[in-house]
Amino acid sequence: MQALAHLYSPIGMLALRASDAGLHAVQFLDHDVPPPTAPADLADCLREPYHQLNAYFHKELIDFNLTYKSLTGTDFQRQVWAALAGIGHGRTASYLDVARLIDNPKSVRAVGAANGQNPLAIVWPCHRVIGANGALTGYAGGLVRKQWLLAFEQPQRQGALFG
């Protein structure tokens, strides 16, 4: 059975969904925002994701170490989502960088589409994927959130993922 929790973050309320199989989703909520879930009321399967996301927003954690449910998506989407985990905290990569990383350099637009379907916002850091010219491009959570997340990670930024 899937459990749900709500975590308040500096960029809005997050909905976390998990089961005993692992984390299913981290999504931004923009409408009908419920109150945050009290830590004492968390289902066991949500305790670690909730704790780690909270620690991230308090600058106490930079790398997530969570169990994920096998997520639905195409093989290509899952390749892209797995590649996102390789973009280190405080770093960025272009859509072309990600396409090359998955050995499919002509799939730049498809990489962008897969990013937009990322079910684990922040945890799989699609906010760290930017345009080849360094411009901020689309983000399912909105460009304001993407800009905030990149600035939030800025003190530890070390440049682009790929030299």
Image: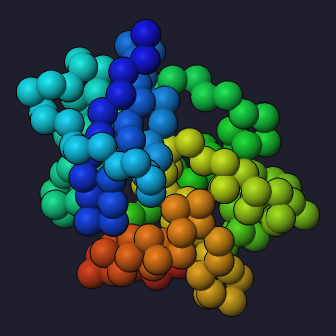
Q: Residue furthest top?
A: 1
The foreground one among 101 and 135 is: 135
Q: Residue at x 46, y 47 (%)?
A: 27
Is residue 162 rendered to the left or right of residue 37?
Answer: right
Left or right: 30 with respect to 63?
right
Residue 79 screen position, x and y as percent: 70, 42
Residue 130: quarter of image:
bottom right
Location of the C terminus (image quadrant): bottom right
Q: Residue furthest right?
A: 106
Pick whichever, 118 or 67, lies toward us. 118
Q: Residue furthest left?
A: 40
| Residue 91 visible in the picture | no
Residue shown at 22% from the left, 43% from the top: 36
Residue 11 visible in the current orientation? yes
**Residue 117 on image: x %, y %:** 66, 48
As rendered, which of 110 and 87 lies closer to the eye? 110
Q: Residue at x 65, y 77 (%)?
A: 137
Query: In the image, residue 155 lies at what x, y percent?
Result: 27, 81
In the depicted structure, whether residue 37 falls above or below residue 11: above
131 relative to 12, above or below: below
Q: Quadrant of residue 50?
A: top left
Q: Which residue is at a point 33% across and 60% down the rendered structure image?
A: 12
**What is the basis of the colouring in this image?**
rainbow
- Res. 59 image quadrant: bottom left
Left or right: residue 159 compared with residue 155: right
110, above or below 79, in the image: below
The x, y position of residue 20, in whole percent, is: 38, 13
